[in-house]
Amino acid sequence: MAEQMTDRAVPQSSSGSLSSSRFVMLVGVTAVLFFLCLLPLEAIPEIPVDIDSKPFFIPLVLTALLPAGKPGIAIGLGVALGEGLRDLMEGYELDDPIGFIGYAIAFPLTSYVIAGRPLNPLLLSFGAIFCAFIQAAFEASSFLLFGEESIAIAVQSAIGNTITHGIIWGALPLVFLVPALHGRFERFLGFAPKGRHTDADPLPQPETGFSASPDAIAWADGLSFRYPGRRSAALDRLSFDVRRGEVLGVIGRSESGKSTLCRVMAGLAPKATGGEIAGWLETRGEAVKIGFVSDNPSALMTQTRPIREVEAALAHEATTAEDAETKALAALAELGIGEADARRYVWELPARAQLMIALAAATVIEPDILILDEVAAELDAAGLALLHSVVDAIRDRDGAVILVDNDVDRQFAWSDRIAILDGGRLERIDATHELLNDDEPLAAIGFPQPLALAGSATLDAEDIPPSAPPGIECLAMDAICFAYEDNTPILDGASLTVRAGEIVAVAGANGSGKTSLARLAVGLAEPSAGQIVIANQREGEDRFDHVAAVIHTPSAFFSERSVAAEIALPLRRAGLAAEEIRTRTAAVAEALDLGDTLEEDPLTLANGIAKRVQIATMLANGAHILILDEPAVRMDPVERALLKNAIRGLAAMGTAILLLDHDTDLIAELADHIYFLADGALTEAGTPGEGLGPANRALLKMLDLRVPHRFEAADGRANRSDRAEETSA
Amino acid sequence: MKVPVLHTGRDSFWRRRDPRVKWLLFFLLILLIYIAPDWTWMGAATLFGVLLAITARAPLGWLALLLLIQLPTILALLIIPMLGGDFRFDDEFRFGLRLALGWVAAILIGVSLFSTMDIDEMVQGLRGLGLPSGFAFVVGYAFVLIYLSVSDLGRVLDSMRLKGVTLSIRRPIAFVGGLAKLFIPALITIVRRGGSMTAALEARGIGSGATVRQRTRPLDGLDVLVAILGAACLVAAIVFRTGLYIG
């Protein structure tokens, strides 16, 4: 078979090189950052003639912290594009045409001046003024197109803009921002932070000799990968194959290398990520098509409309424009996106629809291998059913699916083989039944066995212990109505109460209004009708003092350099004394098991720890109500168990907790009482055993929810036992 | 989510024109502003801009706000020549008038034409004019990134409010401190999104030069007429500016 195998050259890449997709991305990111900061500065009046305010510190931060060369050119073009986007909104100005050229020249030149040198305030200030002077000189020369009478105006504009852009909006913010950002964002763009880990050892040499199965479509042999600026390899000498007609499940703790493996298999790393790669990745035949969908649906959108997104995936196929449109519409329709939605802007559609668009773009090319990186965890029951049908269709036509998913029950049901990753190494790969029936490999990474195999250790619905007896009513929402700006109704007469020490869950499908409910409860939005009462809240007092909420992902949350500073931020803003801040920070860190991470940068933490830091930050000021919106998304089972313990501990201490989720497993494990949210209304459904049990299967299906694995497993065992009794009778 | 674009979607003569023609007209008229020989030409361009704004049913409040922002510059161009003493309609004043009218014309023409195109039409128009497909792609991609980043910024603002960081201009020092707190997660969130989108670009084959197929309809008679008139105006301005006109 070896002679049929086609070597797929694994590209060697260093973090300094810039692929065309990364170049485009850097242009786009710079343009967007510049544009978004430029808009508010437009409110500052211009000084005659044409001395204005432009946020030069944005591109200058990027210029100072990224390498010189191509990145500098991309930044310059990005700033020009950002200015052009402003013109599309606010009209064209007379100094723009040569001003655009000025940006494209000034920033690359500045990158050669300040990149590659130690970062010090003097150099940064010089770089900012140098950059502003070059750009201002070019921009002002636009006036000379009108004739030599305009020389005085051009000189005045050049000097004025050098001062405003170079000093006020350049050097001054730059000397504060560069130290605050150094080492914190570069890796997201695929660059090593300046001066970090330049002495890392070479990647391990591949161990050759792996023998792939005759059914294999693709295989890795001694595959290693390291991200820019890291000492250790994210993938360490992996050897495995992917076979026709199979679903290969991949499980492992956070940072074990699952997503990296997906990116490498899809050919995205190191092209899109930077970094170094070693070893072999081979495919059988030359035209193995790979589709890739990751867990962040909106980040997968590259076109303005869904139909164009799917058509773009067909760009390499030999089809006419009309055929491409027909195929795109059909692929979208199969995943529940009708033609009307297919022609809307992607950002007008909810997250689940965006994920389905990404899935349609990946499947429309009829991939030989479809890679799904933690996609299932984002979906409610209806979305899961669609995903399962896609997986089955690919398996049926002899393709393969790589399914990264830490839900062992789903892996047990969907996958034919499972690979376990730990610390970048492949610990084991085996048939699903063999691997999951063996306690040892799962226990080694802290994962539970699937509930269907767990036997008597599984809790039944009735076994769930109640938390502390509920206390006073802390949060009461009465007949709440809420609608979006375009009058689309979200909540219509929703009511619930949460008492001290109680965990109340709201179960609802994707897009049912859970996040809106959380925003209303915490005071980030106001209801159009109805009343929200918070215990102990005095007249005129801010609701944030009583209600803590974890609504968004950690990346949108952290602003400080250390976990301790992050937890202390709301306390400092509230004007507490330093000693009191230290005491409260230590207490809340201990309650959430964060003592070892207090000095770490919150931006570098794994998802599970980051969520607990978010909770700690929100609770440090003594809030007695905690609102959690899908808190366990993308957590591995170990992180999930730690989070569950933390939530139970907080409830035991008397915190009233409102949990909003489509994850009925989490709800079944934590909640005392549940409500269903559908069509804008909240319906009380009793305990998890009553509301989520198999007896309610039809209702749950109607609500796009599913019976939790634990109840399903208990039901399955009861049925098996009944059948055994019937048989013996 | 509400999208902050100029596009109004109102039906008009200009709304029905091909996006390629609208871009072409925009480029021609902007060139004309630099080439036009004197203030009377600029006055004519401004008048055309006013007519364009009316016939394109451009958002008048938007236009008024933009002109208000530029008012200091426009006034300065007219007033500075008068500061020397007695007002005279001399070369210096005529030059200031030419620049001021040019400024107004550029805003009127740009806003009016762009208010008749949605984002897709803008990108298609750029592609249709034969500009590099990579350039047109980056423009469209930047719009996608902007709108998704705006929702990211909303989340960052929410998070900051939950942490007690509010932006109130009544307390300027706290406002600047709050901006700094806001800036870091905002930048990191947008940069992270950019990194993820790079993977999507590669997955769609953008890195290897794939482009979306272009569907263009043929230009109609009015499209051609508008393009010819725009080009004729520019040629006339060149002729007058270079002294080739000997009438």
Image (cartoon, coloured by chain):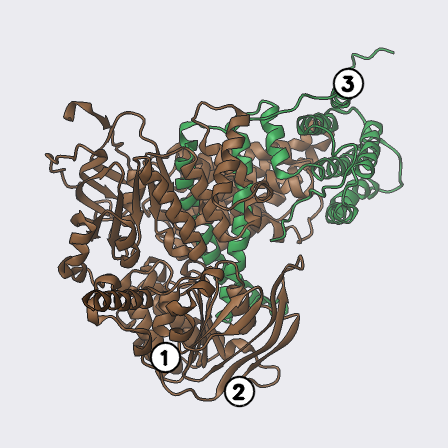
Amino acid on which the number 2 mark rests in the picture: Asn
Letter of the chain in brown:
A
Chain B shade:
green
> Which class describes the residues within 10 Å of circle 3: few (<14), some (14-19), or many (20+)?
few
State the image coordinates of residue B183 (x, y, percent, origin top left). Answer: 49, 57
Q: Chain of mark 3?
A: B
Give me the disc on residue B232. 3
Question: Residue at position x 75%, y 49% from top?
Answer: B65
- The picture quadrant where one finds residue A237 is top left
Tell me the SS state at disc 1. helix
Q: Is residue B11 above or below residue A43?
A: above
Q: Quadrant of the C terminus of chain A?
A: bottom left
Any part of residue A110 in sight: no
- The picture quadrant where one finds residue B79 is top right
State the image coordinates of residue A387 (x, y, percent, origin top left). Answer: 40, 48
Residue at which label 2 appears: A536
**Residue A581 vs residue A513: left or right?**
left
